[in-house]
Amino acid sequence: MLKCLSIANWNVWSVYFIISFRIPSTQAFFGLEGDVVDIYQREFLALRERLHSAEQENLKRSKELNLVLDEIKRAIAEKQALRDINHETKLKLWNVTTSKNVLQLPSIFHHLPHLLAKESSLQPAVHVGQGRTGVSIVMGVPSVKREVHSYLTDTLSSLMTELSAAEKEDCVIVVFIAETDQQYANSVADNLKFPVEIQSGLLEVISPSVHFYPDFSRLKESFGDPKERVRWRTKQNLDYCFLMMYAQSKGTYYVQLEDDIVARPNYFTTMKNFALQQPSEEWMILEFSQLGFIGKMFKSVDLSLIVEFMLMFYKDKPIDWLLDHIMWVKVCNPEKDAKHCDRQKANLRIRFKPSLFQHVGTHSSLAGKIQKLKDKDFGKQTLHKGHANPLAEVTTSLKTYQHFTLEKAYLGEDFFWAFTPVAGDFIRIRFFTPVRIERYFFRSGNIEHPGDKLFNTTVEVLPFDVSLTKTPKYHRTEDGFIRIGVFHNGLAEGEVDPTFGPLEALRLSVITDCPVWVILSEIFIKKAE
C-alpha cells in the first residue's frame, strides 16, 4: 500500500517535469503578442498550484492509510488474544451453548471486550475476609492511593465504632482497593489492623485484577474536561461497577460510601428502618447524604440494571449524571416539561434528613485537587459524650492543651486534649472511696480530629485488697496494678472481673511513644449494682 503511494508521488512530479519541457522556447514567443505570453504564464502557474494541491492530498491520504494500518494491527492483536481462550471458556463468557439457534445475550464483555483475553479479569486479585453473605446491608468503600493523606483507617474506625454487636452481625463492609498494584493492595490490607473485624466477617478487602481496566490512553476529551480528568472519572465508573458486582449477592441493600467520611451514631439501624418503612418498592435510591456518591442506598436486585447502564456509558459521563439519566429513562415523559420529570424522579430518589455521613477529606483522589466539601444537613456533631462517673480524683502526666482538661472530660463537660504522649505517660482515676466496677469504656479521638487516638495503651485497675494483685490470671505491674484491657483502634471497653472486689484506682498507661496528639472524648465507668 505504501509502495503505491511512492509511485503516485513519482507520477505527479513526472507530469510536472514533462509539462515544463513542453513550454515553447523564448524564440517562439518573439512573434506573439504580449497578452498571449501572459495567458501561458497564468496557465502554467495554475497548473503548478494544482500539482502542489495534489501532492498535499497524497500526503493526507498517506497519513489516513497509516492510521488504518494501526487499527488493523490492533484488531489482529485482539483477535489473537481471543484465540488464547479455550472454546469451553468462550461459551461460558458469552452465555451461549452449542445450540445453533440460541440468541446471544448482552453481557459485560460487549462493553469491555478486552476482559475476554484473560479468564481472571473479573476475579479479585486480593481478597481478604470470610465472604459473609445473607446480611441486610452491604457497605462499599472504594479507596485509591492518595498523594497526600489516606483517610481509610479513620473512615473504617468510624463506621465500625458506631455499630452495636447485633448490627455487626447483620452487615458487611467491603473495601475496594482500586489499584492494580497487588503489592500495594496487600500492604493496605495488612496495615488496616482490624483483625477481629476481618476474622468475624464484618470487614472484607478486595482489589481488581490487573486485566480489569481497559486502555485509558484512547479516551476522548468531553464536556471541557482535560484527558486526566476524563481518565479519572472513567476509571471511577468502572470501580463502582466492580464493587457493585461483587456486593450484589451478599445482602438485601447496598450502600455506596467513600473512604474519607465519618458516620453518625446509630446510622445502620436508621438506614435499615428507613428502607423497610418505605410505603412502596418503587424507589431506586435512598440518599443519606447530599454530597456526591456518599450514602446512596440501592436495592441489591437493582444493581445489575445500574451496572449495565453504567457500563454502556462509562466513558461518556460521570456517575452522578448517569444515575440521573437512568431515572429519566424510567419515569420521564419526553412530551412533558422538566417540572413533571422532576416530580416523577422524586418518587425514585428519596432523601433522608439529617445526613448520616459527613465528608472529612480535603485531598481528592484526583491528583492535585483540593475539595473542602461539607454536608450542611449533617449538623453539628458533638465532640464529646458525658456520663455520671463515680467521684474520683483524676491526674495525668500528659501536657494539657489549652482548656481541654482531664477533669472536664471525666465530668462530661468537654473532651480532654493533650500533646503527643510518650512511653510511660498515664491517666489515673483514684476513687474517693473504693468502689465495685462492672464495666468501663474509653473513646479517644473525635469527629473533628479522628486521628488523635491512644495507641498501644493499656487499662489497669488497683484492687483495694492488695492480696488480689497476686492472681496469676492477669499481668501485674510493679506498683500493684492489674492489666485488664488495651486500646484497639482508639477504643477500650470491657467488663471488670468481680473477684477483684472494690477498686481503689483505674489507670491508662501508654506503653510506647505515640505519633500524634491525643483526645479522650468519652469516659464511662459503670458501678456494679
Image (cartoon, grey):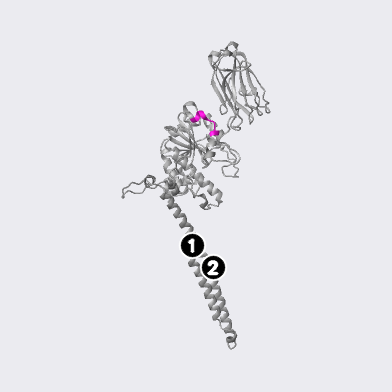
Q: Residue 432 placed where, x, y %?
A: 63, 14
Q: Indicate whether 54 appears above or below 415.
A: below
Q: Badge 1, how many Cα within 10 Å: few under 14, some, many 20+?
A: some
Residue range (magenta)? 190-198
The residue nearer to you, when weighing 96 against 403, is 96
- Residue ID at (46%, 43%): 241
Looking at the magenta stretch, what is its main secondary structure? Answer: helix
Q: Indicate whether 205 appears above or below 338.
A: above
Q: Residue 46 placed where, x, y %?
A: 55, 75
Q: Do we see residue 465 in this rendering?
A: no
Query: Of discs 1 and 2, which sits in the foreground?
Result: 1
First reached walking from the N terminus: tag 1 or tag 2: 2
Residue 434 vs residue 249: left or right?
right
Give the residue pinned by disc 2. Answer: 56
Q: Indicate whether 65 appears above or below 125.
A: below
Amino acid at pointer 2: Gln
Amino acid at pointer 1: Leu
Q: Do we see residue 429 in this rendering?
A: yes
Q: Which of the 4 image quarters holds residue 398? A: top right
Q: Badge 2, how many Cα within 10 Å: few under 14, some, many 20+?
A: few
Q: Residue 392 placed where, x, y %?
A: 63, 17
Q: Residue furthest bottom?
A: 31
Give the residue pinned by disc 1. Answer: 65
